Image: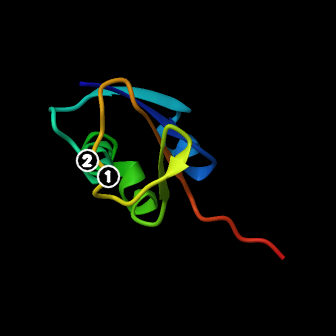
Amino acid sequence: MRTRVLLFASLREAAGAREIIIEMPNPATAAEVRGRLAADHPRLAPLLQTAALAINEEYVAPDHPLRDGDVVAFIPPVSGG
């Protein structure tokens, strides 16, 4: 199934892209997308461990199932003062 992945901030910088299209088996979960990205882009692996997951603009748990055409976003933690 075709999945569009959006990367923000430090993830975007590490990947050198703000968006990646990947093919995932059906069924798949958000956690499996994270694992696939870490395998395909090793520089992302440590950053993905702490990144929040969103599917179609809603935060989700790692075990959330994907549907064909979903947009998965990885958002790194933000600190502020």
| Measured Cα–Cα span from mark 1 to mark 2 | 5 Å
Which of the two discs, 1 and 2, labels the residue nearer the N terminus?
Answer: 2
Crowd tier of the residue under label 2, counting other residues whose Cα lies within 10 Å: few below 14, some 14–19, many 20 or above:
some
Residue at (53%, 48%) from the top-left corner?
58
**What residue type is disc 1 on?**
His
The total of numbered circles placed on residues is: 2
Is 25 drawn above or below residue 45 in the view shown?
Answer: above
Query: Residue 29 — which label?
Result: 2
Q: Name the residue that disc number 1 marks.
A: 64
Displayed quadrant of residue 57: top right
Is 49 drawn above or below residue 6 in the view shown?
Answer: below
Label 2: state its secondary structure: loop
Displayed quadrant of residue 78: bottom right
Residue 70 picture location, percent across and down: 40, 31
Please indicate, yes or no, whether residue 17 appears anywhere in the rendered image: no
Residue 38 picture location, percent across and down: 31, 49
Residue at (56%, 58%) from the top-left corner?
76
Residue at (59%, 44%) from the top-left corner?
8
Residue 16 picture location, percent across and down: 52, 34
* Labels 1 and 2 touching (C-beta < 8 A): yes
Displayed quadrant of residue 60: bottom left
Is 49 drawn above or below residue 43 in the view shown?
Answer: below
Residue 65 picture location, percent across and down: 27, 45
For the N terminus, the image quarter is top left
From the viewer's perspective, tell me whether residue 63 is left or right of residue 44.
Answer: left
For the C terminus, the image quarter is bottom right
Please indicate, yes or no, whether residue 68 appears anywhere in the rendered image: yes
Crowd tier of the residue under label 1, counting other residues whose Cα lies within 10 Å: few below 14, some 14–19, many 20 or above:
some
Q: Nearer the viewer, residue 59 or 24?
A: 59
Label 1: state its secondary structure: loop
Residue at (32%, 52%) from the top-left corner?
64
**What residue type is disc 2 on?**
Thr
